[in-house]
Amino acid sequence: MKTLLWKGLCLSVLLFSCSKNNADWKTQAQNPEFLHRSVKQVTDVIVHDIFSPPVASRIYTYMSVAAYEAAIHQDKKYASFAGQLHGLTEVPQPQAGQEYCFPLASVQAMLKVGRALVFSEDKMDVFYNKIMQEFKDTGMPDDVYERSLAYGTEVAEHIIKWSSKDNYKQSRSFPKYSIQEDPGTWKPTPPAYMDAVEPHWSKIRTFAIDSASQFRPASHTIFSVDKKSQFYKEAMEVHDMGVNLTPEQRQIASFWDCNPFVMNVKGHVMFATKKISPGGHWMNITHVACLGAKADFAQSAEAYARVAISLVDGFISCWDEKYRSTLVRPETYINQYIDEEWVPLLQTPPFPEHTSGHSVISGASAVALTKLFGDNFAFTDSTEIEFGLSVRSFKSFEAACSEAAISRMYGGIHYRPACENGLKQGHQVGEFIAQKIKTRKADLAQKQ
């Protein structure tokens, strides 16, 4: 009798232990930090590989859509982007009746797509091996692990195939921007005098907006060298602001600089400093918001995807205007017509002036985040700490995007209309995407 009781007790303990371990791996795997760390890894590689802001936004979007499409199967309230984003057909589905770890599938999909779109595959591989081992260490059953990896790979391959048809590869062979003689048009700026970045970006397939020119902003002020003209006054405003910057304005300009390739000149030595892109900054703000809202894995995937789509279409819309107007930068104009010794606080980026890219994508991102987390979502932005800058706190996403816009004037790289018109343009893009793209089935059904 004692033997039977002892065996029964051991069996009960074993069953309880197995049940507890099974519950433990499921709980551990749901930690959204797996997703947040994966986004940060791709950001670090984007910084290392020096992708331009528009190209970085493309990478963020494809990898975030992949992560979202794999993650949503654990919660029936989420809707696929298939049929909503241009060219995205039905995404592969998991096998009915089989057990999956969808967070693992989501991270797999994100990292596979990210790896396919960056240069430093070795850096991605080191991180990938580490985070996959962490998933294994949760105690996840081998069959669930392998099945989830396979499903994540299926989703990734579908997204990569979709990405191959957006005209990006073809645009790599398009002709360079030709410098025009007209004094009102953009010219390369010191110290590197780089070629114009992505002059054909408006030819990339849009994701949600109808066309690159759908949200064409108000035109810039008519170019003039007349000292009584409005254009001269706007240039003089940038000049005077740059001369009289307060410490706070300098801090704001530096915080939102986000120039991925700053060329430094020390005597006869020239070297580059790498920084996060504007899109990377807003993806990190998304991370901060998710933490503040205690967003779960699927909610976090939704947030990254919605912000990334707003970013990429924001850049396409902005670049469409930049290379339509091809307006001269303040640095070039001021040096030629006002003060040849004047230097902006920030290094002028290598593309035309109107509209401000920061203003457009910040406005679009702020709309996406506000729709998800609310109007008065206070947060502290720590994005720039790793680049030697302090944190900044905001009462809302709108407050952050407004500061990002005006920072470009403080930095001496945009006239006021580029910032104000760009912010309006970004809000229009963001609002359109928020209305058109639905990530909740109830909202999608109501729309239809």
Image (spheres, rainbow, N blue to C red):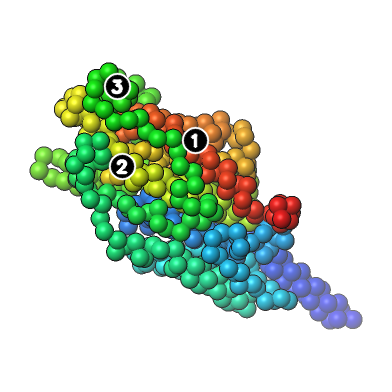
Q: Secondary structure at mark 3?
A: loop
Q: Is residue 202 left or right of residue 296?
A: left
Q: Earlier in the sequence, mark 1 or mark 3?
A: 3
User: Residue, x 80% and y 73% (percent of image)?
Assistant: 12
Q: Nearer the viewer, residue 419 or 151?
A: 419
Kind of residue indicated by mark 1? Lys
Q: Which residue is mark 2?
A: 326
Please state the horizontal and vertical placement of residue 412, each as a whole percent of the image: 30, 30
Kind of residue indicated by mark 3? Ser
Kind of residue indicated by mark 2? Thr
Q: Nearer the viewer, residue 344 or 251?
A: 344
Mark 3 to mark 2 CA distance (whole Å): 20 Å
Mark 2 and mark 3 in contact (Cβ < 8 Å)?
no
Q: Secondary structure at mark 1?
A: helix
Q: Which residue is mark 1?
A: 424
Q: Secondary structure at mark 2?
A: loop
Q: Residues within 10 Å of mark 1 (few under 14, many from 20)?
A: some
- Circle number at residue 229: 3
User: Residue, x 20% and y 24% (percent of image)?
Assistant: 338
Q: Earlier in the sequence, mark 3 or mark 2?
A: 3
Please state the horizontal and vertical placement of residue 20, each as a whole percent of the image: 72, 66
Q: Is residue 347 visible?
A: no
Q: Quadrant of the N terminus?
A: bottom right
Q: Residues within 10 Å of mark 3 (few under 14, many from 20)?
A: few
Mark 1 or 2: in front is 2
Mark 1 to mark 2 CA distance (whole Å): 19 Å
User: Residue, x 34% and y 46% (percent of image)?
Assistant: 323
Please state the horizontal and vertical placement of residue 421, each as a whole percent of the image: 44, 34
Please state the horizontal and vertical placement of residue 109, each as a whole percent of the image: 53, 66
